[in-house]
Amino acid sequence: MPDFSLYFSSIFLNNFPEMCYNKFGSGRFEKSDLIKVKKVDFLEGLIHSIETFGTVDGPGTRYVVFVKGCPMRCQYCHNPDTWETVGATRMTPEQILDDYERYKEFYHGGGITVTGGEPLVQIDFLIELFELAKTRDIHTCLDTSGIMFRRNNPELLAKYDRLMKSTDLIMLDIKHIDPEEHKKLTAQPIDNILDFLSYLDEKEKTIWIRHVLVPGITLIPEYLERLGYYIGQFKHIKALDVLPYHSMGKTKYEQLGIDYVLKDVPEATKEQAIEARGIIIGAMKKRRHDMGE
Ligand code: SF4
């Protein structure tokens, strides 16, 4: 998922604590600092990095695990270095949670978030991690694009059903509401993502929606209204986070030798994010009104 930690996040204005800095500095440590893997029987996750004091990836201050591997190719992705699994550091759920325990005094009202990359690429690992987290009474949050969901695969669906039992919050990124534009923006179809949203709502899971405003691509009133009207039908969406596009990830593309498609696209502003969020919320209310609520 994109790292927008330095940027405006509309739903967090009133609900979230100040950015937390302490002796651990930014909280993010590099792969070389990660715990050395020992031989145990747990599944291992393919980890990109860990942020020990995340404040924008779920409620409270959180331990944020960035995993590797993602089939999406969002044009604004901040973390193209998570797309491939090559170079991942392997960690077991137990190792991750033991590391979490080192900082747990800072996580009152927080917990653990898994983001990426796309966490659901490693669903077996995720199940073990979250189930173990719940045995330690840790709040669990999944930050996902939903792209891996397949309702017509019974074996996979059973894994999702199991994962949901140990997942407290799902932050779902909806990249674009228009199917054609979604494909252009992410190189993937939207169908399974929207089906995942329906599935989450059926399961009565707490859902936060995230949407990135890209000028000329998603920052268009018609699309914002369509998005709001669509998501307005779901009862378990509890927050909407509208994030202005910025180009901070550009340098990574240069380093990786990947063309940065949005190089001529201007950044969006906080004011545009406030306005866009208002349009989406207005359309959500209209949908609920049309549904007789
Ligand atoms: S879903 Fe998109 S933004 Fe998130 S990691 Fe994958 S390519 Fe990047």
Image (cartoon, rainbow, N blue to C red):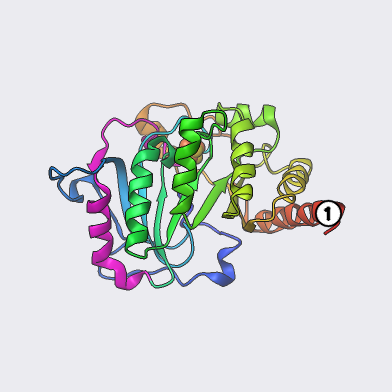
User: Residue 197 colored magenta?
Assistant: no
Point 86% across, 52% down: residue: 290
Estimate the x, y position of residue 95 in percent, counting from the top left: 22, 52
* Figure quadrant of residue 166: bottom left
Estimate the x, y position of residue 99 in percent, counting from the top left: 24, 58
- Regarding residue 35, the answer to whether it shows in the image is yes
* Figure quadrant of residue 80: top left
Estimate how packed mark 1 is, as few (under 14), some (14 to 19) or many (20 or more) residues with alpha carbons within 10 Å.
some
Q: In this view, does 12 lie to the left or right of 92?
A: right
- Regarding residue 243, the answer to whether it shows in the image is no
Q: In this rendered view, identify the residue nearer to me: 124 or 190.
A: 124
For the residue labelled by badge 1, is the local secondary structure a helix, a strand or a loop? helix
Whether label 1 lies within 8 Å of ligand 1 gets the answer no
Which residue type carries mark 1? Lys
Which residue position is annotated with label 1? Answer: 286
Estimate the x, y position of residue 46 in percent, counting from the top left: 30, 39
Q: How many labels does the image show?
A: 1
Q: In this view, does 104 lie to the left or right of 149?
A: left
Point 56% across, 59% down: residue: 9
The span shown in magenta is 78-107
Q: In this rendered view, identify the residue nearer to me: 284 or 195.
A: 195
Q: Does residue 201 sit above or below 264 in this rendering?
A: below
| Image quadrant occupied by the C terminus | bottom right
